[in-house]
């Protein structure tokens, strides 16, 4: 159902480098690059993630309560992505661990622009 998600940035070059390295953990790379946005995915036919300089020319800001969740293939990948995000300069919003009794394992972090992301595994 999801075609792609987007977050804003005030520095496309810096944000691009952050997500290039982070999405290597998922085997994903850039599938589209335009002057004001970059899109990552495994193909343009699968759900993608994009970073945009705001169209209206105003500064990108973080939405309160807004979060994008990335699906991992294992608990190990949750840990790997979380550690990679922090190593790239992201900040922790919740260390990896079980969140419910039904197998939901997740970690939370913010990117370089303050956008909140989750990486999770159901297992």
Image (cartoon, grey):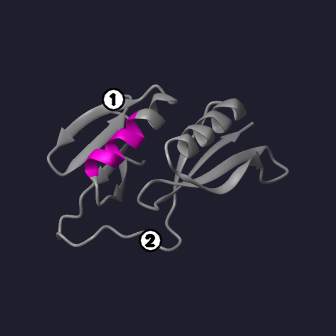
**Rendered residue at 64%/44% (across/down):** 120
**Percent position of residue 58, x then y:** 22, 73
Residue 1 horizontal side relative to residue 79, left or right:
left
Q: Is residue 45 above or below residue 57?
A: above
Mark 1 sits on what residue?
Answer: 43
What's the distance in space between the residues labelled 2 and 1, CA to CA? Answer: 27 Å
Pick the front one: 47 or 74: 74
Q: Which residues are magenta?
A: 12-20
Mark 2 sits on what residue?
Answer: 63
Pick the front one: 11 or 108: 11
Q: Is residue 66 above or below residue 89?
A: below
The residue tagged with tag 1: helix, strand or loop?
A: loop
Location of residue 10 (image quadrant): bottom left
**Rendered residue at 20%/39% (across/down):** 33
Residue 32 horizontal side relative to residue 35, left or right:
right
Q: Is residue 109 visible?
A: yes
Q: Is residue 44 visible?
A: no
Residue 22 horizontal side relative to residue 35, left or right:
right
């Amino acid at each position: 159902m999801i075609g792609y998600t987007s977050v804003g940035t005030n520095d496309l070059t810096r944000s691009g480098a952050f997500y290039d390295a982070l999405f290597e953990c998922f085997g994903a790379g850039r599938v589209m690059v335009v002057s004001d946005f970059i899109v990552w995915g495994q193909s343009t036919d699968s759900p993608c993630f994009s970073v945009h300089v705001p169209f209206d020319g105003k500064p990108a800001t973080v939405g309160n309560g807004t979060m994008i969740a990335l699906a991992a293939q294992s608990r190990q990948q949750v840990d790997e992505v979380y550690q990679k995000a922090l190593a790239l300069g992201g900040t922790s919003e919740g260390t990896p661990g079980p969140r419910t009794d039904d197998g939901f394992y997740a970690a939370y972090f913010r990117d370089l622009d303050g956008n909140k992301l989750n990486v999770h595994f159901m297992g």
